[in-house]
Image (spheres, rainbow, N blue to C red):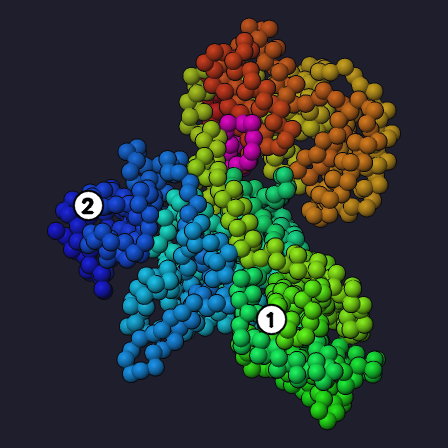
């Protein structure tokens, strides 16, 4: 038995299975031919080695305790029998199955494990747990569920019978290191919670530093224009944020079964966590929901680590937002900073990211109906309602209610100023209207919180001194914590609820108010109401909060416009009762049906739909650090091996080669579009080989192609998508379709000019047979929008003309019907067949939609007479994307290197 000792953990294994050299300062582990240099990978393998479990004749389960696994104990804390164990890391970023007998591969093969939706790991900054020290002298803690936590309500909404829920997060209280192991065991066994313990100093830099002083202000549109205005970016705080996310990933590793479990990450505290999980498990089923706003690209792009966060989020399978505005801002950032475009298919929005589809979910969170209704039925609630009724209603006072956290974005001071304006403009409300402002304790800390507290107190004092009377204060500020039933009682009594945040993620206060105003029979008796009469409520909400779009019956206001808010308050007080009843009915119907359970089930349903294709794809992990991403490909779509194609090239004697130019031989972003000397040399080498027919197929005009490739005498050219064709430089151009009437240009060109004038950076290219409108240098969002409008416009005015209107990556083109690059491929193969030159090697390379026609012709011709029966056929596109090609290469540089390899073979065969 070999033994390796580490503090508190000892691993003993049979000789030959685990070999550990005795090196005091270096951990080097050899496991079945795989080598590891660091503790993370060692512990990872030890936890999840299927072979070890099989040798020990143990049941496949997820383990939470490494010691159980190492010692061979068969009493896991939780897990499911019959699951296949997760894969293990072969080397950084790449995964394979440990029970495969095949040689190691850089991609993870398709697993035979079935997809089961029966367990979810919910990850958030804080666990839904309350912790309290035992009051007696004995050490220990008392733990209980936090009933107000959204994460716990989410679980109730899903139903215990439908899915098993495990939580990973921090506790609010600091746990001494000596107690952490015991606390972990208690929370895991009793609550299925996995606590993440962070050193106090690290937690402070992560949470109060990066989260609250940098991310939180920026996501709420506050730029650090000065040191006093939000936190300036601090690299050490960012490193603390990344470190904490890594610690969370390590804790998840202890309980996850990646073949079956879903992982749902919540909020901006853990935005880089998806990268760490995706790096360990390429096919992890991972969702992320952002509960805060996502700022516009103009704000977000000021963040120095903007791309790192975007790429980390894109390692999720599903990303959720409360509103379309937040999702639109995220998509715009992906477009402007990463060059990614999105598509909407059958109601679902998706981003293509290295072969993976990242879905976007737009759905506001709801409230827990059962919890609210149970609190409304409490005797304590009835007693508090009776007390408030006597304090306000029985004395002829109308209560307006505000419930907000004490922070700079909740707009408390603006609300108070609007109340002051109401009393000035409408003195008839003096002595009758009371604004009750409940100020919940601030979640953050710092100078800004103290300033808000001071401003709020001084404003309340001024208003009460100005408009107050004996026995009447127009503003009642409650700045101490209230019990939940007390807050519900205020909702029940208030005639109008005011939410005037200047920026907020969701804010469920209006939802809670609506349900509370619906009440129940007991509360109706307390208030002296007839239960058969429809209930009523009024809402004044800010335009800048997440719930505003879903509350169409509310009075929406700009909180910065004090007069408008004051007018809205007056309107709510004056509104006729039948209308307030109709507005309440509309809101109650929506809120009661779109509760937290509906939200959670809808999110998980979309997550399951998004992850269905995981097992059908082959995955590669590429990139280092936070640039890591997974390339996912269809099993039949693979990277073209230069060695393989060169070998095939050597074996064959009759070859057809079709090459696109822009984006294939030359990067699209190049300012100088002419081929360089290296490309010219490669093309000439290929053309000098008597066994080759080489053709460059482009959308460019005859003149442009002739000028660019003038040094290539034997190179064939196809211009304007194949309308014109020339086999060699000294031959005449021919047309592949009958010469078309170009009178349609007189209709199309004025339309394109109109869009060129209104779209800065766009241009028109007038070719002999076609017109192209390009927005390559325009704003990507506006250009894309204008392109769609132009497409519709042109299709309408050219409906009776013999032309087609097509769009590409950054262009809209009008060309004669029947003209395509596929026509060129078909013509080349038929010409070679007529000459008795049946090709046994076909290479076709392109990068955009127009090249798909060539791929389709090449692929469909493989079974026909125009290609040799056992021909080597290579249809290759640029980058991983949906394509009719079977192969891909990453960029133009790889294309050139591959062609250079073919040219080298030809040079060796050309006689001197």
Mark 2 sits on what residue? 56
State how many labels appear. Answer: 2
Labels 1 and 2 touching (C-beta < 8 A): no
- Asked whether residue 881 is drawn in magenta, I would say yes
Q: Is residue 337 left or right of residue 201?
A: right
Q: Nearer the viewer, residue 667 or 408?
A: 408
- Numbered circle sitting on residue 827: none
Q: Is residue 625 visible?
A: no
Whole-percent x, y for residue 757 in the image: 83, 44
> Is 216 or 670 nearer to us in this picture?
216
Mark 1: secondary structure: helix
Residue 522's tag is: 1
Question: Is residue 54 visible to the viewer in this orientation of the structure?
Answer: yes
Q: Is residue 143 one of those drawn in magenta?
A: no
The picture places residue 800, in percent across and down from the top left corner, at 83, 24
Residues shaded magenta: 880-895
């Amino acid at each position: 038995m070999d033994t390796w000792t580490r503090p508190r953990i000892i691993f003993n294994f049979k000789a030959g299975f685990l070999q550990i050299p005795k090196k005091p300062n270096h951990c080097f582990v050899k496991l079945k031919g795989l080598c590891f240099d660091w503790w993370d990978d060692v512990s990872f393998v030890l936890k999840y080695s299927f072979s070890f479990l099989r040798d020990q004749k143990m049941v496949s389960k997820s383990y939470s305790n490494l010691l159980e696994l190492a010692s061979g104990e068969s009493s896991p804390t939780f897990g499911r029998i019959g699951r296949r164990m997760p894969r293990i890391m072969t080397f950084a970023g790449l995964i394979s199955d440990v029970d495969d007998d095949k040689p190691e591969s850089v991609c993870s093969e398709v697993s035979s494990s079935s997809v089961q939706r029966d367990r979810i790991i919910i990850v958030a900054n804080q666990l839904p747990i309350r912790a309290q020290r035992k009051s007696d002298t004995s050490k220990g803690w008392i733990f209980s569920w936090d009933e107000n936590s959204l994460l716990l309500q989410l679980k109730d909404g899903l139903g215990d019978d439908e899915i098993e829920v495990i939580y990973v997060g921090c506790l609010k209280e600091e746990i001494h290191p000596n107690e952490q192991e015991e606390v972990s065991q208690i929370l895991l066994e009793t609550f299925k919670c996995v606590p993440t313990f962070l050193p106090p100093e690290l937690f402070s830099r992560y949470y109060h530093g990066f989260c609250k002083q940098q991310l939180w202000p920026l996501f709420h549109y506050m730029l650090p224009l000065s040191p006093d205005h939000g936190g300036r970016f601090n690299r050490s705080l960012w490193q603390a944020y990344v470190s904490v996310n890594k610690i969370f990933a390590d804790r998840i590793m202890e309980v996850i079964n990646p073949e079956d479990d879903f992982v749902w990450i919540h909020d901006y505290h853990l935005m880089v966590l998806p990268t760490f999980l995706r790096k360990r498990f390429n096919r992890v089923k991972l969702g992320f929901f952002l509960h805060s706003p996502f700022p516009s690209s103009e704000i977000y792009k000021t963040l120095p680590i903007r791309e790192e966060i975007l790429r980390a989020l894109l390692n999720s399978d599903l990303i959720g937002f409360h509103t379309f505005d937040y999702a639109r801002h995220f998509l715009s950032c992906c477009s402007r900073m990463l060059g990614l475009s999105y598509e909407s298919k059958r109601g679902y929005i998706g981003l293509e990211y290295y072969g993976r589809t990242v879905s976007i979910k737009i759905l506001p969170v709801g409230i827990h109906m059962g919890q609210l209704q149970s609190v409304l039925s409490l005797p304590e609630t009835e007693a508090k309602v009776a007390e408030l009724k006597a304090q306000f209603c029985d004395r002829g006072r109308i209560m307006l209610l505000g419930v907000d956290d004490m922070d700079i974005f909740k707009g408390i001071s603006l609300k108070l100023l609007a109340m002051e304006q109401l009393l000035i403009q409408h003195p008839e409300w003096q002595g009758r209207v009371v604004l009750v402002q409940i100020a919940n304790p601030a979640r953050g800390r710092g100078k800004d919180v103290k300033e808000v507290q001071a401003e709020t107190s001084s404003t309340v004092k001024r208003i009460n001194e100005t408009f107050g009377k004996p026995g009447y204060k127009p503003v009642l500020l409650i700045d101490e914590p209230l019990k939940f039933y007390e807050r519900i009682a205020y909702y029940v009594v208030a005639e109008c609820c005011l939410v005037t945040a200047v920026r907020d993620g969701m804010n469920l206060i209006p939802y809670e108010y609506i349900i509370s105003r619906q009440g129940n029979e007991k509360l109706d008796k307390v208030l002296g109401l007839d239960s058969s009469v429809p209930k009523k409520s009024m809402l004044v909400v800010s335009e800048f909060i997440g719930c505003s779009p879903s509350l169409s019956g509310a009075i929406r206001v700009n909180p910065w416009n004090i007069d408008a808010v004051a007018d809205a308050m007056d309107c709510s007080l004056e509104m006729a009762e039948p209308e307030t009843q109709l507005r309440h009915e509309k809101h109650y119907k929506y809120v009661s049906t779109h509760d937290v359970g509906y939200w959670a089930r809808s999110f998980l349903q979309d997550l399951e739909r998004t992850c269905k294709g995981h097992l059908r794809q082959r995955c590669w992990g590429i990139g280092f650090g936070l640039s890591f991403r997974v390339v996912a490909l269809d099993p039949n779509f693979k990277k073209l091996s230069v060695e393989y194609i060169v070998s095939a090239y050597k074996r064959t004697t009759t070859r057809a080669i079709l090459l696109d130019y822009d984006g294939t031989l030359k990067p699209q972003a190049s300012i100088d579009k002419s081929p360089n000397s290296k490309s010219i040399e490669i093309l000439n080498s290929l053309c000098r080989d008597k066994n080759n027919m080489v053709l460059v197929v482009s959308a460019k005009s005859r003149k442009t192609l002739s000028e660019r490739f003038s040094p290539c005498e034997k190179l064939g050219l196809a211009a304007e998508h194949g309308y014109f064709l020339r086999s060699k430089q000294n031959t005449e151009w021919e047309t592949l379709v009958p010469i078309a009437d170009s009178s349609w240009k007189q209709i199309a060109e004025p339309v394109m000019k109109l869009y060129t004038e209104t779209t800065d950076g766009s241009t028109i290219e007038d070719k002999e047979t076609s017109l192209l409108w390009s927005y390559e240098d325009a704003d990507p969002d506006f250009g894309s929008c204008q392109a769609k409008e132009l497409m519709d416009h042109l299709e309408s005015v050219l409906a009776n003309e013999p032309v087609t209107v097509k769009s590409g990556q950054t262009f809209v083109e009008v060309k004669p019907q029947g003209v395509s690059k596929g026509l060129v491929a078909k013509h080349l193969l038929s010409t070679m067949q007529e000459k008795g030159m049946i090709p046994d090697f076909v290479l076709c390379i392109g990068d955009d939609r127009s090249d798909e026609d060539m791929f389709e012709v090449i692929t469909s011709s493989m079974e026909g007479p125009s290609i040799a029966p056992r021909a080597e056929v290579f249809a290759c596109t640029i980058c991983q994307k949906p394509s009719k090609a079977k192969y891909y290469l990453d960029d133009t540089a790889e294309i050139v290197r591959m062609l250079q390899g073919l040219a080298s073979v030809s040079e060796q065969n050309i006689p001197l």
